[in-house]
Amino acid sequence: MKDQHEQNDQPVDQEPRFRIRARHTESTVTVHQAYRPGIGLPAARNGRFPSTWRRDRMTWIKPSFLWMMHRCGWGTKEGQETVLAVEISREGFEWALRNACLSHYVPGLHDNQAAWKRELRRAPARVQWDPERDLHLNPLPYRSLQLGLAGEAAARYADEWIVGIEDVTPLATEVHALVRAGELERAAVLLPEERPYSLDEDVLAHLRS
């Protein structure tokens, strides 16, 4: 296993296609979500999602800040105006990964499509790998993790795993303004430090397409 504190100083063209990169400590990992203010603001204020948060829907969490910016348009898309950084326990995050299924069928990884569909229906979490983004939100040649939580996983996320919730909408707005002004170096300095997140090989073996 690699040192969990190593820095990712590899050139983009040498970056592994599948790797989790996240802001993390020895006990927590930070993921991102975006909600309408009616959910996002009380969540950040109270450190827990309000009762209006839908437990019966799949919720997607993203370690990558810039992928979240791509998804929510820097917090400008309707219903995604409040960007949250949610700090959760590593134990919970890794439980979700161990119990997740890939969101798409991969020949060789799954016995057949029917077996994959059965696994997908059973799994409380699912994984999708999407191209990481640069400051202009253009796709890069390597992938970032999206983790979908439903049923037991969503309940554990809301009730057990959350350590803290921060409203990072002002950060998104500031970075976006610097990008639009062409000040990419200043924008890059403000980004969360997302380092390689080390895992035992068996945790991700069933999740690489």
Image (tube, rainbow, N blue to C red):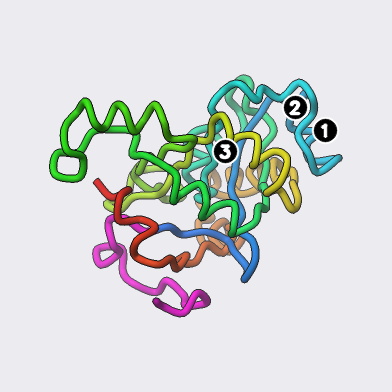
Q: Is residue 165 magenta?
A: no
| Circles 2, 3 touching at the beta carbon (< 8 Å) | no
Q: Main secondary structure of the magenta part?
A: loop
Label 2 element class: helix
CA separation in Å, label 1 and label 3: 22 Å
Name which quarter of the figure residue 2 lies in. bottom left
Name the residue rendered at 38%, 48% in the picture: 132
Which span is picked out in magenta? 1-19
Q: Earlier in the sequence, mark 2 or mark 3?
A: 2
Q: Is residue 42 left or right of residue 115?
A: right
CA separation in Å, label 2 and label 1: 6 Å
Three-letter code for the amino acid on which mark 3 is drawn: Ala
Name the residue rendered at 59%, 48% in the picture: 31
Q: Is residue 46 left or right of residue 127?
A: right
Label 3 element class: helix
Name which quarter of the figure residue 48 lies in. top right
In the image, residue 4 sits, relative to residue 183, either above or below, namely below
The tag on residue 153 is 3
| Circles 2, 1 touching at the beta carbon (< 8 Å) | yes
Label 1 element class: helix
How many discs mark residues in the rendered view?
3
Three-letter code for the amino acid on which mark 2 is drawn: Ile
The tag on residue 42 is 1
Q: Label 2 crowding class (10 Å Cα cut-off): few <14, some 14-19, many 20+?
A: many
In the image, residue 203 sits, relative to residue 67, either above or below, namely below
Please identify the residue farthest to the right as the structure is shown: 46
Q: Nearer the viewer, residue 154 or 194?
A: 154
In the image, residue 123 sits, relative to residue 187, either above or below, namely above
Q: Position of residue 123 (x, y in %)?
A: 43, 35
Q: Position of residue 150 (x, y in %)?
A: 54, 30
Which one is closest to the eye, mark 2 or mark 3? 3
